[in-house]
Amino acid sequence: MDTVPAHPLAAALRGELRGEVRFSTAERAVYAYDASNYRQLPLGVVKPADTDDVRAALALCRAHGVPVVPRGAGTSIGGQAIGPGAVVLDFRRHVNRIHALDPDARTARVEPGVVLDDLQRAARPYGLRFGPDPSTHTRCTLGGMIGNNSCGAHSVAWGRTADNLDSLDLLLADGTELTVGGPLPPEQRERLRHRPGREGELHRALQDLTAEHLAALRQGMPRLPRRTSGYPLDALLPERGYDLVRALTGTEGGCALVLGATVRLVQAPPARALVVAGYPDETAAADAVPALLPLGPLTVEGMAADLIAALLAAGPRPPALDRLPEGGCWLFLETGGATPAEALDAARGLAAAVRREPRATVTVVTDPGEQRQLWGVREAGAGIVTRLPDGGEAWPGWEDSAVPVERLGGYLRELRALLGRHGLRGVPYGHFGEGCVHLRIDWPLTDPGRLGEFRAFLEQAADLVVAHGGSLSGEHGDGQARAELLPRMYPPEIIGLFGRFKRIWDPENLLNPGSLVDPRPLDADLRFPGRDLPLALPYPQDDGSLLKAVHRCVGVAKCVDTSTGVMCPSYMATGEERHSTRGRARLLAEMLRGEVVTDGWRSEEVREALDLCLGCKGCASDCPVHVDMATYKAEFLHQHYRRRLRPASHLSMGWLPLWLRGAALAPRSANRLMARPLTGRLLRRLGGIDPRRALPPLPGRTFVRWFRDHRAAHPEPAGAQPVLLWPDTMANLLDPEPAIAAVEVLEALGFAVRLPDGPVCCGLTLVSTGQLSLARRVMRRSLRALPAGLPVVGLDPSCTAALREEWPRLLGAEAGPLPGRVRTLAEFLDGAGVALPRLGGRAVTQVHCHQHAVLGTAADRRIEARIGLDNRVLDSGCCGLAGNFGFERGHYEVSVAAAERVLMPAVRAAGPDTLVLADGLSCRLQIGQLGDGRRALHLAEVLRLALRGAADPGRPDGG
């Protein structure tokens, strides 16, 4: 697949390390990006198995003169997690153990790759938590948080990362190891000077640096809670106790590698309430903050109306937004207590203080679900505001400036004015309680001729924040984005001390060079260059450009959260960055750039990465910027195999509707062929199907034949409201029982069911295999078979989603009003307002990923409630079968791993009296094949049970 550069370091690393050593084109391309505007191609990537691997990798890189960049989740916004020609050490993959958690001491011993939420889960049973909580808490690592001195919404109460560390275990570039702690009395500082060897030399150099520049360190370092720019050298001052933990936290991996840390934990309030205060604009909200801080809120987060507008432009409206009071900007003020009543009392006190401002409005939210929804909007901010409400692109760069909180209102007013003078727009929000503002701006970064505007704004913005006594960065650090601007914030003596401090720790400049000292220009190495290629799909939200579409990905990495949600099932199974939505977007960007991935649509690197994309569409809904990898995959496969021989599975599974129609002429003979070992194996081999997959048997009678017989025996009742049932290929030819049940249910409720005038197919199997020209022909033929005007009820979520989304995408205006007439069964019945009988009982539901992403499930939940079903909706994501994906050779392990993450354990744990609901045929097949014959039911079958008054749901035969 990839060609490995002939660098001797690669062979040396493979010979010494137990972890993965990746110098391939694909891996280098994926790790050339973080969440910044920059691209730096590394020499290779190492995923150390443990800290011994880290030691060995660093020693070998030192011997070969190759720099090293440590990396956690790769969500650095300043470019700190990438480096040209470096070896990237990915700590998150394996160096991620929690060694100990002491609830009495309220401490934990962690490795640098521990994900924050994993630490929070470990601490939660003891009523404890780690205080800092950045919005990326589901995937960011403790090592990355130490590198950037991360904060989060609760830092106003619990401080930054530096405030929550006891000690750091360090590995220096020369191989020296030492542990550093917090403040020390003079006699202990003196003892450190006399340590033998490199350690004593280091302490003498650091203490001498401090002693020689006491006045500069006391006067030249701004004092504010969110100063994250530059090295925190004032922590070395005698009155600060020579606090090496603080001095090293926020040094961006440029001074030492962290092998481990002892972190302090805080008591988590058992109950929370959320006060949402509304103000006319963000400056009014900022001006109100100083009066609220003495009341001790756990958070003081600001969010303006333009962020809400960007959210609504990107997707459906979260119901919790109805709880926002009137205003143009809101403060989220969280309170805590030992009981809900105590938290509510504190919230009422805050609300009363808010009301003292005549123009303010306020509401108190106590429902935990509504609080989570509102916080979800705030946490998605970094992704949401990458697209402005009108669809314009906005980028990081002036991402997290901070000023003293009492000057925040004035700073915001002048910052808005500066944007206006430059003709720029952005959406400010952030940690108003500590004067920190997040802002993404619509710089013309894709136009090389206008990069001067980018530089001019940043230089003027830096001068503005310094004039307000602030910091270029209040949370994310400097990196390439801001380090060049540090001389505007610090006097020359301090800038010189930054370089001296770096050289004391890393004299050979091996660790993350250029990140803060001797930085690369802020307008160099931008990730945006690329070319537009002819496309088969329209991309209307991206001006017809795949390049613009893949640049939607800004690296916030929600797709590498493995704890919840639909996105991204292949990453959850493999843990490989190139199998995440972000990794695939980066590879597509490299393909369009053409420098490293040079063969365009013929790229094997891109094909391999996309091969394990299940096409679940989870990213299209769950990614904050709605990267739609299933669509990009269809485009790529269409172009990649154009005028080329396709894989066998594209012909067997992509053309499955055709083969099923042929087999339906003699279903018994077809079943015998599939059941026989020799012919069954031959069919799988010829079709590119995994030998471990069972081929589902064909029914003795198709649904369409059943319907003709049924209609002959039961003519359409006069005067009944007609509805068109979409007889998708699988419901017609493979699993007709849900369609039969749907007819019986609809007719029992007074509707007249009709079918199209001829054979129809949504074309999804052709779309998912990239056969887009043929898919269009199938769609056009099917469209001609549909009578005008009738509501169309779809049963399989993937087909129904294709009618709504793929048909207008591929047919354009030819699709006419059809997509707007398509409903799921639940949507149709919910909208019709028909009376439903009560069934009762318990159920677990597997939501089809296309229903989650495209159709929604609110109507399903209402229908289930109306029939009295006690239903638990699984947070299981994609079932793993995903249409053709799970049948194709080479996909079985990933398919099963996706199912075994949540779905199959829940199915096996469900009692025999618990219904298993799954509207998707793929989901039902996966459950049946992996669940010892347990039969999952379609909603139509459940409603038929309710109508019949039957309740014996758990038997394998579904009876």
Image (cartoon, rainbow, N blue to C red):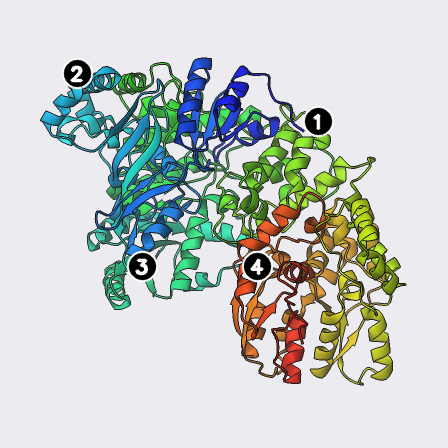
> Percent position (x, y) of residue 499?
31, 17
Tell me the SS state at disc 2. helix
* Foreground label between 3 and 2: 2
Q: Foreground: 676 or 642?
A: 676
Q: Is residue 344 left or right of residue 837?
A: left
Q: Are marks 2 and 4 in contact (CB under 8 Å)?
A: no
Closer to the N terminus: mark 3 or mark 4?
3
> Residue 753 at what x, y percent from top left?
77, 76
As measured in the structure, the alpha-carbon distance from the residue carrying label 2 to the one carrying label 4 is 65 Å
Residue 404 sits above or below residue 186 on the image = below
Q: Amino acid at mark 4?
A: Met
The residue to which callout 1 is attached is 599
Asked if one can make out residue 556 in the rendered structure from this viewpoint, the answer is: yes
Q: Residue at x 31, y 21 (%)?
A: 176
Q: State the mark number for residue 212.
A: 2
Residue holding disc 3: 360
Q: Amino acid at mark 2?
A: Glu
Residue 707 falls in image quadrant: bottom right
Q: Which residue is mark 4?
A: 904
Mark-to-mark CA distance, 1 and 2: 57 Å
Where residue 325 appears, x then y in whole percent? 38, 62
Residue type beneath disc 1: Asp
Circle 2 packing at 10 Å, graded few (<14), some (14-19), many (20+), is few
Q: Is the residue marked by circle 1 packed among few (<14), some (14-19), or many (20+) residues within 10 Å?
A: few
Q: CA distance from mark 4 to mark 1?
A: 41 Å
Q: Residue at x 35, y 17 (%)?
A: 174
Nearer the N terminus, badge 2 or badge 4? 2
